[in-house]
Amino acid sequence: MRLLLTTSQGIEDLAKAEVESLLSGLGVPFRVEERPLGVEGRVLAEVGEAYYTDEKGRKRELSVPTYLNERSRLLHRVILEIAIERFEGIGDDEPEKALKRIEDFVSSLPIEHFVKVSESFAVRSFRKGEHKITSLDVSKTVGKAIFERLERFGTPRVNLDHPAVIFRAELVGDVFFLGIDTTGDSSLHKRPWRVYDHPAHLKASIANALIELAKPDGGPFIDPFCGSGTIPIELALRGYDGRIISLEKYRKHLRGAEINALSAGVLERIEFLLGDATKLSEYVESVDFAVSNLPYGLKIGRKSMIPKLYSAFFQELSKVLEKRGVFITTEKRAIEKAMTENGFEIKHHRLIGHGGLMVHTYVIE
Ligand code: SAM
């Protein structure tokens, strides 16, 4: 089977490594490719049939999509591929022609091999790039083509609110993809533990990408601007056995982080501190790892405060950080100045897509 896996833009390599590691555990043949046909935020996995042996020694099939949905920390969706196709020049096509191309293609696909005709279905679409059609147009067209195809084999049923099967159609540039979304309507990055919703919370998938970049080895770990606690909670859920500290200036968010940790079942694993990260050395003597998404000033606080805040924070960090720091922010100039002025070396930089922006991510030592 071929699975189209979605994640945030800029962390495809980390998602690929995670999927490879998870699939290795199953003992199945597989091949994983990041950015198939150049599409960002996507990873393609070709996986052989997976089996396990039950208590009576019988060979039983194992659902790889279910396994990935359950175990991945970096993926957003696991989609069983029906077809992928490049439609050269679709961006320039008039709406009627573009939709006709999609309709003809979908009508030719053996949809009936992938679903039971009696199961209700809906089509959800995603579109990115320059086109003269909308994602709603794509949903309607693909839905019609699937309906007419399935009608040959029975009586198909559409249920837009609570479908049994979700088809996912994606048009990214000139690449069209159709598959069955095994994840459902709620993306995996929306963690069920999130009972307190911070206005600028980090996607859990990105939190895990930052943790991967920090490579924490069991030494003391801090998120000095923890907000609702996404990074410390995800680290604790990974079974980290070192000290995890979560610092936040505002009581409301710190309380929210504690409630989230309680909901995630890791409250006892994290030390929550109310305090100001620009006075970090007053709370901790030394830490090996610091990972955080810094206040950007877009959603929180006044933007003019950012250079001063970053400068004061990195000065404090230089007193306590022993090994590695990973930080994500939109404020490139302010963070680079603050890091270099305080003696940190930038070991790695990348852009990660978050909340419609490409956000700068740094690994420093
Ligand atoms: N990663 C968090 C999450 O997923 O919820 C969001 C972090 S948010 C971008 C930045 C946080 O830093 C906010 O909760 C804000 O209250 C906090 N903050 C701002 N200034 C601070 C300071 N001087 N010390 C500690 N926390 C601060």
Image (cartoon, rainbow, N blue to C red):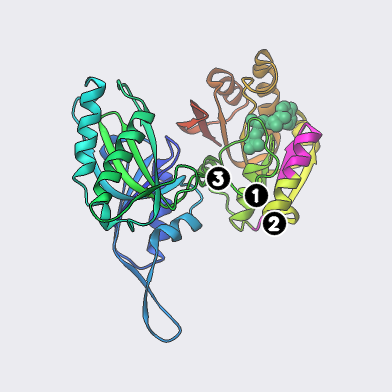
Residue, far top: 304
The magenta stretch spans residue 243: yes
Q: Which region is colored magenta?
A: 241-257
Task: Please name the residue shown 49% across and 26% down the image.
Answer: 356
In the picture, residue 226 is in which quadrant?
A: top right
Q: Amino acid at mark 2?
A: Gly
| Nearest to viewer (mark 2 / mark 3) | 2
Q: Which residue is mark 1?
A: 193
Q: Amino acid at mark 3?
A: Ile
Q: Which mark is residue 211?
A: 3
Q: Do the numbered discs 2 and 3 sit on residues whose CB atoms are within 8 Å?
A: no
Query: Which of the two residues, 68 or 136, is positioned nearer the viewer here?
Result: 136
Secondary element at image label 1: loop
Q: Which residue is mark 2?
A: 265
Sequence-earlier tag: 1 or 2: 1
Residue 331 at what x, y percent from top left? 56, 21
Query: Which of the two residues, 295 or 106, is positioned nearer the viewer here?
Result: 106
